[in-house]
Image: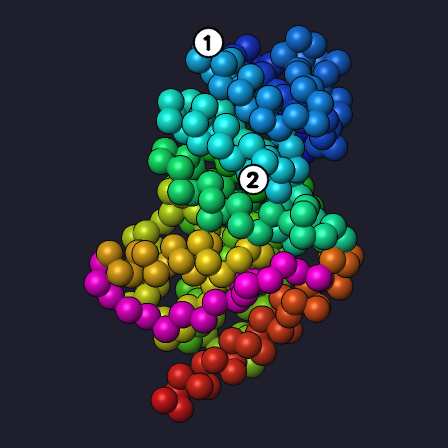
Amino acid sequence: MTYEETLTELAKKDERIVVMTAENRALIRNMPAVLHERFIDTGITEQTMIGAAAGLALRGRIPVVHALASFLTMRAFEFIRTDVGISNLPVKLCGYIPGFLSDANGPTHQAIEDVSILRGIPGMEVYAPADEQDLVAMLPDIINAPCPAYIRINHKKSTYKHTKYIPGKAEVISSGVDFTLLTYGLLFENSLKAKELLEGKGYSVGLVNLRSLKPIDEELILNIASETDLIITIEDHFLTGGLYSILAEIFLKNKITANVFPMALRERWFKPALLNAVMAFEEFTPEKIAEHAIRKFENILVH
């Protein structure tokens, strides 16, 4: 099933669900004819949409709101924090084209700090499915949870068959002694291919699809830190505040250390281009991920 089909079925079964958008119907264009008055388009007014969603949530509704991830998480941030976060309302924030998925768009449309700013709100959950199949599997639990949530919407198709989604738990694809690749969202597919390239060279490689960044599978991460020589974090997000920072927080809290090499955007926005060209220029192709992993691993062995 697609995201739209899944959300439609959930809304048919639960009249509390209201689907909202700030004039972005790319993923939900067929829903107005089905939901009628439970589909609300506020126009290009992200702040107004969040305020209205909070009001609906106070009256027992479950608003599922949609907008471009950059405008949803930044333009409407104060409204999310104040209207939704402080009251801990079950508003579900669906950010379209986050990270590299905004490919040809410039910095104004690039949501590459969204994980950092949204996870800072108390009670807010943050999700990043690997592809549309993963998104569909996660959606019912996210919507039915009684708290606010941000979803990095990923509508990309994949042939990979994911395991059953368990809230708060990561998906372990493989375990490895030499490397463990920790990733989420769009970069899962390239990380999977990088794992295969590394295994072809004789390395023992773990791969984890985190799925959820808040709550995060802390127990698994601590186990990985004790079992693998090098952890590589792979994310289409700024280095600050994303997965690399999350690991630092976990390790400091538990008074441990580990060899961690981050692949993230460092102090700059990415160069706009078609998606494959973005991956190549920013060095997030499977080949580059594998190359960076080997180089860092050999450096660790030397020292």
Counting every numbered tag in the picture gives 2
Image quadrant in which you'd find residue 166: top left
In the rendered image, the quadrant that contains the N terminus is: top right
- Secondary structure found at label 1: loop
Residue situated in front as seen by the camera: 78 or 25: 78
Q: Is residue 236 above or below residue 30?
A: below
Residue situated in front as seen by the camera: 233 or 81: 81
Nearer to us: label 2 or label 1: 2
Residue wearing tag 2:
74
Q: Position of residue 143 (x, y in %)?
A: 49, 26
Residue situated in front as seen by the camera: 161 or 233: 233
Q: Amino acid at mark 1?
A: Arg
Magenta highlight: main SS? loop
Q: Earlier in the sequence, mark 2 or mark 1?
A: 1
Q: CA distance from mark 2 to mark 1?
A: 26 Å
Q: Amino acid at mark 2?
A: Met
Q: Position of residue 300 (x, y in %)?
A: 40, 84
Q: Is residue 39 above or below residue 141?
A: above
Residue wearing tag 1:
59
Highlighted range, magenta? 254-271
Q: Residue at x 70, y 27 (%)?
A: 44
Q: Residue at x 67, y 52 (%)?
A: 107
